[in-house]
Image: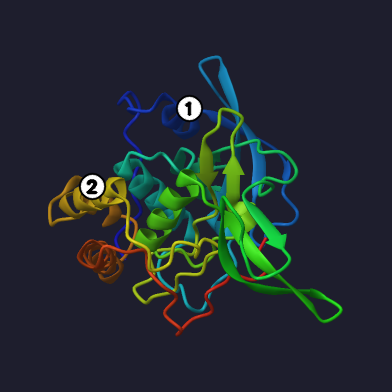
Amino acid sequence: MSPPERLPAPGVSVVNPTEELLARGELTVRGRIAEASNAVLLCTVTHEGVSAECVYKPVKGERPLWDFPDGNLARRERAAYLVSEATGWGLVPETVLREGPYGEGMVQRWIDAGDTPEEGLLALVEGDEAGDGWKPVALAEVGEGRTALLVHADDPRLRRLAVLDAVINNADRKGGHLLPAPDGRLYGIDHGVTFHADDKLRTLLWGWAGEPLTDEARTVLASLASQLADGGPLATRLAELITAGELAAVRARVALLLRQGTHPRPSGQWPAIPWPPV
């Protein structure tokens, strides 16, 4: 594993001002998000009179995962943000690696999506038809021997996120990780279990499985392939965060998506739906 990506030296500008705030600002811990499986701290970050809410996930608070033995989850979160930025879609909130009150960790801009962020994006419906504007995912048990059809919205924002997840091999795309912002943008969060060299894609966004990729997605994937080539800007940055084998697997996944021209289907070798799903 390469050493962790280092932040620019003091005085060197960061292109995105929110990244600069997250990277250079003073972190003040306000509390802990109790339902998270790893240590997730809600903080305020302040720099040169500007403040914002953010999430700080210290590496020391990560629970070891037997199937993700290399590096740490914080690096993978940063890597997912870099790939998202390289697509031009901006699907992941600004995310940096930095030192904090409890050591090195990931710091990410807080997105306030309300109490039920998945509302309007996911639903359970009776019968076996998704209905207009929805895509079927799978049958789900809802108690007392009854089942319902799990569906997600046929939303172009979700479709972009499904492509991103296929590229980064997201093993945990749950409903609670979908955050619609007040300005209408949609963000995905919690990308610690990504970039594995083996196929581990687990998601609630299977509704487009086997369908042709959009022209936009193919254009974005072609751009990613160029940026991921040896010496390319994205490849250089990812090499500081994930292993050489994982980087090679990213290239292979992008190449496969371009060659097949369709959204991936579940492999059958790994549970396709994360648990719990929300």
Q: x, y (%) of residue 27?
A: 59, 33
| Extreme-bottom residue of the structure | 269
Q: Secondary structure at mark 1?
A: helix
Q: x, y (%) of residue 217?
A: 31, 50
Q: Residue at x 57, y 67 (%)?
A: 137
Q: Residue at x 32, y 64 (%)?
A: 262
Left-right relation of 51 to 256 = right
Say which amino acid is labelled 2: Thr
Q: In this picture, is 2 found above or below 29?
A: below
Name the quadrant of the C terminus: bottom right
Left-right relation of 109 to 43 = left
Q: Residue at x 41, y 49 (%)?
A: 160
Say which amino acid is labelled 1: Leu
Q: Is residue 96 visible to us here?
A: yes
Tell me, for residue 219, which label it has, or none.
2
Callout 1: 10 Å neighbours few (<14), some, many (20+)?
many
Q: x, y (%) of residue 90?
A: 41, 39
Q: CA distance from mark 1 to mark 2?
A: 32 Å
